[in-house]
Amino acid sequence: MKPFARIILFLCAVMMLTATVDLPDWADPGSPASTHLSPGFIEQGYHETATPNVVTAVLADYRSYDTLFESVVVFAASLVVMLVLRRTSTGTSRIKHFRPKREGRDTILRGAAQSIIPVMQIFALYVLFHGHYSPGGGFQGGVIFGASFILLSLCYSLKFAMQRFKEKMVLICCACGALLYAGIGAVCLAMGWNFLGYAGLAGLLGVTDVMARSHGILAVEAGVGITVMAVMVSLYYDLASGGDMEEGL
Amino acid sequence: MTWDANLLWQFDMLILLMMVICAVAALSLKGLVSSAVVTGAYSFFTCLMWTHMMAVDVAFTEAAVGAAVSTVIIVATAQYINPWSKD
């Protein structure tokens, strides 16, 4: 079977490399994407959304549906992992694992974790709320915030992390983030604009249409951040403990 | 800002070389945890490549998701695989 697999692999590689020739050059100004869409976003983006980072403006405003359903997909992934792995009964049918035994209290590791986790969380919030001006945004900020809980769980224990961030709370956060995003869209719809047309928030917030779009981007980024943070923690809880939430890595 | 793509082609080649080395090492290493760590290193070089292509947002995502969280998740999954099995 092995030579057969290699032939298939080789053929796939040849086909992909052949297809690569037809792609436009890197940063080619004459490629279709650069001639029609990009100039509009780059020239109009700041005047329409008051967001200097054009990537954030495209991600959370012009292509907001994509981002909404991305966060829903992430949410669904965490639900599926939980459906497959989570068990309430413990002891009888545990998945066999091969993790090394933990012995003693690793003081240096815990001290390092203790000093780095607050910095990570502040940095995550900075990345989230500074996404208008610098690289970053809800997704990255959420992942960094979730990673701080994963680090806590790795350096102390799964139980210790679960006392700080309970499983129920994780699930509520998962759902609330996606709900916040969709809720913003629904509010815009109720104000007589399109779904996720943030200019509809202008009347509620008492600002101009342009500023309303900027604030709308911030709100949905916060929603994405909450969902992604909770999903990362939920995935780790389920995968590290094999679903019984007794003992992690 | 202007950016000459040919300015740092040696840097590009170095990253490409390191990515290929990481990819081959991840497949050929015996230990599962070492494979996972090398996968993280591969993600890190991908992240450097994105930075070199001026796609800083993508690089940031790659650094946060690829190099950090997915490595942890791969290690968390690898603990259920028998390290002494023949396959």
Image (cartoon, grey):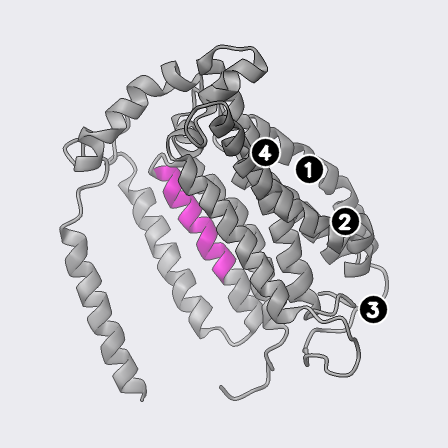
Question: Mark 1 or mark 3, which is nearer the start of the sequence?
Answer: 3
Where's residue A29, x and y in %?
A: 18, 31
Cα gap from disc 3 to disc 1, whole angstroms: 29 Å
The amino acid marked with disc number 4 is: Ala
Cα gap from disc 1 to disc 2, whole angstroms: 14 Å
Label 4 Cα crowd, 10 Å radius (few <14 / some 14-19 / many 20+): many
Where's residue B58, x and y in %?
A: 42, 41
Question: Mark 1 or mark 4, which is nearer the start of the sequence?
Answer: 1
Q: Nearer the viewer, mark 4 or mark 1?
A: 4
Q: Quadrant of residue A123?
A: top right
The amino acid marked with disc number 3 is: Glu
Cα gap from disc 3 to disc 4, whole angstroms: 40 Å
Task: Name the residue located 80 percent from the left edge and 79 percent from the top edge.
Answer: A91
Task: Name the residue located 48 percent from the left edge and 61 percent from the top edge.
Answer: B39
The answer to whether the residue labelled 1 contacts the one labelled 2, judged by CB atoms less than 8 Å apart, is no
Q: Which residue is mark 1?
A: A121
The rendered magenta stretch, by its main secondary structure, is classed as helix
Q: Is residue B43 magenta?
A: yes
**Of residues A58 and A66, which is closer to you in this image?**
A66
Where's residue A231, x and y in %?
A: 61, 51
Question: Mark 4 or mark 2, which is nearer the start of the sequence?
Answer: 2
